[in-house]
Image (cartoon, rainbow, N blue to C red):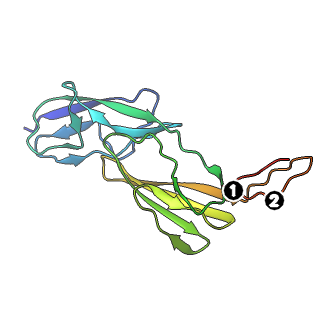
Amino acid sequence: QKVEYSITYHLDGGSNHTENPTKFFVTDQIPLKAPTKDGYLFEGFVDEDGQYVVVIVLGTAENKTLTAKWVKDTFKTEETFVLSDREKQLPVYGLPETASANISLTFGTEQVSVVGGKAVFDRVGDYTLTYTITLISGETLEKEMKITVIKAQITIAGEYEQEYEAGKKLTLI
């Protein structure tokens, strides 16, 4: 006779993935899927010993209690930068420690070079920054940000010797 074991999930206000079972047998191997929670990114399930669990492995012969760990989703959807020929650090957001991310940046359909999390925003207009995040469960999600690059303008009343451009010295007289 097969013995059935249970999985209890503590989701802290999240919603479990429909493919995550609540029962299993010693002959089952079950990859766990990421639950969801508004305003948060899934960091992973931890067991009673605080160990991350990504799969209920074949041969498991005990009930399991899994607690979802979450990281606040701080991604923005829009940002404005000033036109510059200097490298600028791309926005960095809190990712779950267990996740990895690939970053891509485009201007229209043209790929823009990103090196060490930095890029040059040397054209006025809209860029698209895409983070492809791979969660501990192996599932991926994408976060997109529109970066609008503008030319800096400063209006100063009075007399001055030269036209001002971002990064240049302005001498008032």
The part of the image, by quadrant, that contains residue 125 is: bottom right
Q: Disc 2 marks which amino acid?
A: Gln
Q: Name the one closer to the observer, 114 or 65.
A: 114
Q: Disc 1 marks which amino acid?
A: Lys
Q: Name the one closer to the observer, 78 or 135.
A: 78
**N-terminal label among 2 and 1:** 2
Q: Residue at x 85, y 50 (%)?
A: 155
Q: Residue at x 15, y 40 (%)?
A: 25
Residue 43 % position (x, y): 35, 38
Dot 1 crowding, Cα within 10 Å, few <14, some 14–19, many 20+: few
Q: Residue at x 84, y 56 (%)?
A: 161
Q: Say the numbered circle drawn on residue 162.
A: 2
Dot 2 crowding, Cα within 10 Å, few <14, some 14–19, many 20+: few
Residue 37 % position (x, y): 48, 36
- Please identify the residue farthest to the right as the structure is shown: 158
Mark 1 highlights which residue?
168
- Please identify the residue farthest to the front as the structure is shown: 173
Residue at disc 2, secondary structure: loop
Q: CA distance from mark 2 to mark 1?
A: 10 Å
Q: Is residue 37 left or right of residue 164?
A: left
